[in-house]
Amino acid sequence: MNKISKTISLLFIAFLLISSCTEKEAAQRPNILYIMTDDHTQQALHAYGHGLLDSVFFPNMNRLAKEGAIFRNSFVTNSICAPSRAVLLTGKYSHINGKIDNVAPFDWDQMTYPKLLQAGGYETALIGKIHLGGKPQGYDYSLTLPGQGNYYNPEFIKNGEEELKFEGHCEALIPQFVIDWLENEWDREKPFAINYHTKAPHRNWMPEEKYLDLYEDIEFEFPDNFFDEYSGRGRASKEQEMEIVNDMYWGWDMKFEKNPFTGEESRLPAPFGRMNEDQLAAWNEVYAPKNENFLNDGLPRENAIKEMPGGEKLAKFMFHRYIRDYLKVVKSVDDGIGRVLDYLEQQGLLDNTVIIYTSDQGFYLGEHGWYDKRFMYEPSLSTPLLVRYPKEIQPGTVVEGMVLNLDHAPTILDFAGMDVPKEMQGKSWRAIAAGKNVPWRDAIYYHYYEYPGPHNVKRHYGVRTDRYKLIHFYYDIDEWEMYDLQTDPDEMNSIYGNPEYAEVQEMLHKKLGELRKQYGDSDELSQQFIDQIKSNEN
């Protein structure tokens, strides 16, 4: 089908979807504010009750949880940046929308929920990070970071064409751009639908000037399994390359100008060159003395985190530099959300706006000694989801049903009063957020593809129920792992092949097969993607 035919088809679909709406219903349709952070994780959100942040509080995110709903079992279908965003836009799994990894191109010509909203009378805007390449479609206005974007003095692409550079920190700029669009560009005769996407807290966690010294006086406890030796599991956890101590860069991640052990320039230096003179001076005032103190305190031997006392000192320094910087940029995100909420409230728009807060996936904050995401293990499989809409959702609502990022597009269309196209694979969670007792899923399906690739995480797919999880690692291995999340919530010991769980294992294999069939995935399709990558390499 060519582009013209696709456009005509989308317009026709949109006409059918809104044809049942009366003028009165259309006039009452809510605004949609979809806030997506990058790599924010449930462990870093006080509302989820994790002990790591007893002394760190993000008031605006927690306001959304207090005044709306918190989803305790919110998950993604493929825990990596660009594919997760493609799932959001299309309501389809990666193997259907074509964006299986960060490398594969995204087809903007396919149906997305912003196109349907736009055709259905909404004014749409995309502001911040999208990471899908190409010219965004379905938006009346877009101002996006190119690729991953930069924290300091970033470039933005306006409407997919014009590159503009701005002075300042991206997490101060992006919320202001949202407010500016609402104030100056939005046609108030229409409801709005905004994708407000932050860069933070994506690596490499460059804090805003006013927060450079924040949390520096807080000592955080290592996660219980920080010094994980990966016994009780297969090759995948042992062969990953996402350990804080062994795999982070001294420049990019730890913010040193040179490797303290070798004196050589870091393989990936931090982008200090983007800063202006005042920004760099403020940075050095905080970080230079701390780096110097670490160097003068006696260098621990590298790659020795299991040895005492030097290895633990190295691990403690790297863990704290990472965690503190991560939380600092999350604080800037929280500030930005507060500014946008305040504006909506001042304009009398807040209570007629469905506000959805989430992240493209979860992240490791030292669990198993890791950072990054990708694995189907809980810290990266799960993601925050907070929703405020007082016309339907009672304050303090807790939702236990398992939802996926696959469900967001159908849900947004549902709130907009539009039917959900049958080709979307997700389900609207609008009813369960409102406390209604409706039939819901009892298991979720996951599939990760980006291997060989960064961080060396094997390809795998799997199924998760409310208690159990089954994972199959493939490509250059053929290994199964299974976990009882009730007795082993940290997933330290696989019970696959344990005779005591034989019936559970059989049940999970059956459920996995059913879900793969339901969503149109198969070993044959996985092999096609592998063959395609090998062909491209040649």
Image: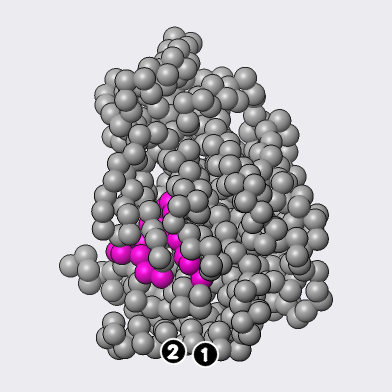
The residue at which mark 1 appears reads as: 16
Label at residue 12? 2
Q: Amino acid at mark 2?
A: Phe
Vertical relation: 457 (above or below) 324: below
Q: Which residues are magenta?
A: 122-138
- Residue at the left extreme, as displayed: 538
Quarter of the rendering containing residue 125: bottom left
Q: Position of residue 103 (x, y in %)?
A: 32, 61
Between residue 470 and residue 28, name the one nearer to us: 28
Relative horizontal placement of residue 193, taking residue 386 as reference (left or right): left
Residue at horizontal 60 percent and vertical 25 percent from the top? 215
Q: Percent from the top left, x then y, of residue 500?
A: 76, 68
Mark 2–mark 1 CB contact (< 8 Å): yes
The image quarter in which residue 274 lies: top left
Q: Is residue 40 left or right of residue 7?
A: right
Neighbours of disc 1 within 10 Å: few (<14), some (14-19), many (20+) = some
Q: Is residue 92 visible?
A: no
